Image (spheres, grey):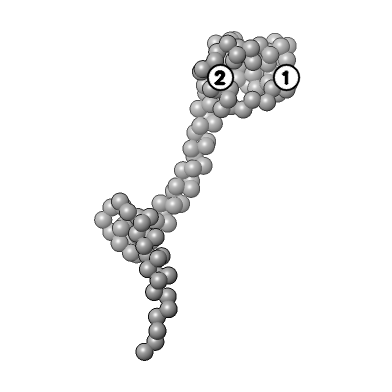
Amino acid sequence: MARIKRAMGRRTRKANLFRRVKGFFLGHRRLRQAKEARMRAEKRAYIGRKQRKRAFRRLWTQRINAAVRTHGISYSKFAFGLKKAGITLNRKVLADMALTDPTSFEAVVKAARTAIGA
């Protein structure tokens, strides 16, 4: 009789699979459907991580746009002024600054406005 040498590897693979699909609905916890459900879930999780970055960038842009319009300048002119002034703050920091520290944000807006000469 042949000796089975892959039993532990198979058991480990199955245990990892079932750990990943714990909480899935009905047959998606069982073997064949579990494999497919796990692959689909991991694919969607990968896509979701990219979409989350996209969504936050859009949110930060909207917040900055709303904040600079109160100072009488559009977002595109503000971004151009920042580049011309040599200010290298990213959108996340600018959006946070607009919410939490309006006085320093106003100074940044003034610096951008003087850089473009508007």
Which mark is nearer the camera, 1 or 2?
Answer: 2
The quarter of the picture where the C terminus appears is: top right
Q: Residue at x 68, y 26 (%)?
A: 88
Q: Can I make out residue 69 in this image?
A: no
- Give the image location of residue 14, x and y in percent: 37, 65
Q: Label 2 crowding class (10 Å Cα cut-off): few <14, some 14-19, many 20+?
A: some
Residue 38, numbered label: none
Secondary-structure class at tag 2: helix
Q: Residue at x 68, y 16 (%)?
A: 112
Residue 5: quadrant of the picture:
bottom left
Q: Can I make out residue 7 in this image?
A: yes
The residue that mark 1 highlights is 85
Residue 18: quadrant of the picture:
bottom left
Above or below, 65 against 18 in this view is above
Q: Indicate left or right for 17 with 60 as reference.
A: left
Q: Residue at x 73, y 15 (%)?
A: 115
In the image, 116 versus 102, the foreground residue is 102
The span from disc 1 to disc 2 (Cα, nearest Å) is 18 Å
- Give the image location of residue 105, x and y in percent: 59, 15
Q: Label 1 crowding class (10 Å Cα cut-off): few <14, some 14-19, many 20+?
A: some
- Give the image location of residue 35, x and y in percent: 38, 61
Q: Indicate left or right for 33 with 67 as reference.
A: left
- Along the polypeptide, which appears first: circle 1 or circle 2? 1
* Tally of numbered tags: 2
Name the residue type under label 1: Ala
Secondary-structure class at tag 1: helix
Above or below, 26 against 10 in this view is above
The residue that mark 2 highlights is 97
- Give the image location of residue 1, x and y in percent: 36, 89
Q: Residue at x 30, y 62 (%)?
A: 30
